[in-house]
Image (cartoon, rainbow, N blue to C red):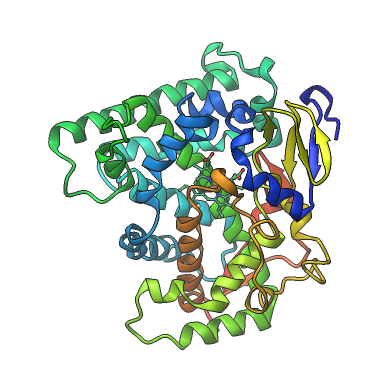
Amino acid sequence: MQLGGLGSFVLISNPQAIQEIFNQDSKFDVGRGNRLAEPLLGQNSLMLLDGDRHRRERKLLMPPLHGERLQTYAKQICRITEQVASQWQVDQPFVARAAMQNISLEVILQIVFGLSEGERYQQLKPLLTDWLNMTDSPLRSSMLFLQFLQQDWGSWTPWGQMKQRQRQVHALLQAEVEERRTSGNEARTDVLSLMMATRDEAGQPMTDEELRDELLTILFAGHETTATTLAWAFYQIYQRLDVRERLLKELSGLGENSSPMEIAQLPYLTAVCQETLRMYPVIPTLFPRILKLPMTIAGYPFEAETTFMLAVYLVHYREDLYPNAQQFKPERFLERQYSTSEYFPFGGGSRRCLGYALAMLEMKLVLATILSKYPLALAENAPVKIQRRGFTLAPRGGVRLVLTGER
Ligand code: HEM
């Protein structure tokens, strides 16, 4: 595929070829293909690293976002969902994606940054919201792709405004890190505290710049992706009575005092999230893989520097894997096990999404909390189309919902 000034790419939708790439990922660079994101995220961002530094950073960041650690966050996610949903008024339509962004921003601020109140939280929240909204229109997101628009001529140019906000965000994050160093961090369970306490194989902690860039990376990578997927899930659930009824039946089978982790293990709820991510992979092609040396893939020879785009979207719509691929059918995931190169909404190999476990947990808990307590309906009849939003694919208009007041 030739993409004008952006160069040429090899687009792959063949699972065997994709598996070959995942299995040999030390032969590819990925971070340098993400350079577009450097002005936003900083040069220490995990997304921009390759080789040993990438391996080191992932090792440090993995434990706080996986395994038992996640269980401690589950109740907080349900509480945040309740806070947002309790504001909805009967018969007043709202945009699902925006509501879900409120939830996912709050989840990251509380669970990752460890902030839920106080002056710094009050200052950071609106600043981060503005900073993230950089990509909320095709015009504004084009700044990321077109370097000539990246001119910092003060607050009256969009890029200048972005940079100014970023400096303010950096200063606030730096102050937070310094305060925790002096006041002690031991009793805290948020991801930032764990990142500050961790040490690499040489016994070294993460530097302040690394902490700051990774916090912004997690926010950038984890907030819109999760919110957008949830909006698509609501779209399908409220279009399809059969799906909704089966979900409600499964949820009502849980006892009064069921724990959030029991909810997260429900098979049909899990399948609904998986099918949503199949039909609407928010990142439709993975991070570009750049070949470091000549190599043969699927029997074809490729030269060094060839850039591969692994097309999640195309694989997820293959009729040989997903019959009636245009149809939302969560049962597929109950009937069949897909391999890591047949189904990969979170990517694969050593670059697999760092936040997949948190994202899956969050989606299930948000859906379960809202479905069991808030009777909703779609507030629009026309089919919702897919629209590009910065780096992601999102529902045009964000999916309008309304609280109906009756089941
Ligand atoms: C439904 C939600 C999400 C989806 C669909 C998603 C998808 C992805 C994809 C496709 C990649 C690229 C993987 C590759 O090229 O192989 C990625 C990378 C990444 N994601 Fe996610 N993501 C989601 C949520 C999150 C969350 C909640 C976080 C943080 C808590 C997060 C943090 C990251 C990071 C840091 C990377 C870069 C990993 C690296 O370069 O090693 N993501 N994600």
- Report the residue at 56% width, 11% height from top: 153
Q: Is residue 208 shown above or below 396?
A: above
Report whether residue 45 is seen: no
Quarter of the C terminus within the rendering: bottom right
- Report the residue at 65% width, 30% height from top: 140
Q: Is residue 177 shown above or below 266?
A: above
Report whether residue 375 is seen: yes
Q: Is residue 97 shown above or below 148?
A: below
Q: Quadrant of residue 15?
A: bottom right
The spot of residue 67 in percent (x, y) is 37, 59
The spot of residue 5 in percent (x, y) is 80, 22
Residue in front for this viewpoint, 161 or 58: 58
Quarter of the N terminus within the rendering: top right
Q: How many marks?
A: 0
Q: Is residue 356 left or right of residue 3?
A: left
Q: Is residue 171 left or right of residue 339?
A: left
Q: Residue furthest left?
A: 183
The spot of residue 19 in percent (x, y) is 69, 51
Q: Residue furthest top?
A: 153
- Report the residue at 59% width, 22% height from top: 158
- Report the residue at 83% width, 66% height from top: 319
Q: Is residue 378 left or right of residue 154?
A: right
Residue in front for this viewpoint, 140 or 177: 177
